[in-house]
Amino acid sequence: MDEIFKRMKQVSESGDIDAFYILIREDVNLLDHIDKIPFVDTPLHIAASAGHIQFSLEMMELKPSFAWKRNLDGFSPIHLALQNEHIELVRRLIQANWNLVRVRGRERLTPLHYVVAKGDHLDLLDEFLLICPNSLIDSNLELEG
């Protein structure tokens, strides 16, 4: 099993969708195995860190739960995309699922918190608030709590 996980990581880093489906043919439950691990860099985490848009969207389609999962450092895929400044990927992720604006990562920070704290890409704030106005409520609750 370790060997196929290692190959999955390489495929995710390269963003090779065809190679991914070759792995799935070897183990049709591969994504389910990964999903059972509480804190893990899923293929979506790895692809989001690398900025692979099409691969990331493919993973979200196949395993939507990966978008909400935290890795060992406490970050979701959208947080990793933001940290690595893959802004177009961030936009595509929230287009695929607008609720990702509300996903909490390490220290309960949402993507909105991250953008405000970092001070970069403030244009994303408009997009976040337009697509998910309740993300502002999440931020205010965090400040009160």
Image: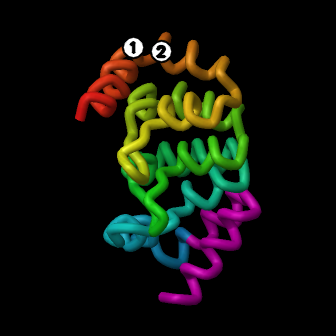
The amino acid at mark 2 is: Leu
Q: Is residue 49 left or right of residue 126?
A: right
Q: Which segment is the magenta one?
A: 1-23
- In the image, residue 106 lies at what x, y percent? 42, 53
The amino acid at mark 1 is: Pro
103 is higher (above) or lower (below) than 128: below
Cα separation, mark 1 vs mark 2, equals: 4 Å
Residue drawn at point x = 37 percent, y = 27 percent: 139
Q: Residue furthest bottom?
A: 2
How many marks can you see?
2
Towards the viewer: 2 or 23: 2
Write down the residue under mark 2. Answer: 129
Based on the picture, tell me whether residue 6 belongs to the magenta stretch: yes
- In the image, residue 33 lies at what x, y percent? 38, 73
Q: Element type at marker 2?
A: helix
Residue drawn at point x = 70 percent, y = 34 percent: 87
Tell me how the rendering is colored: rainbow
Residue drawn at point x = 52 percent, y = 29 percent: 94
Based on the picture, tell me whether residue 7 belongs to the magenta stretch: yes
- Secondary structure character of the magenta stretch overall: helix
Q: Is residue 107 left or right of residue 20?
A: left
Q: In this view, does 58 lie to the left or right of 104?
A: right
> Where, quadrant-wise, is the C terminus in this rendering?
top left
Q: Which residue lies furthest to the front in this view?
A: 144
Q: Mark 1 touching mark 2, by CB under 8 A?
A: yes
Give residue 133's mark: 1
Towards the viewer: 84 or 69: 84
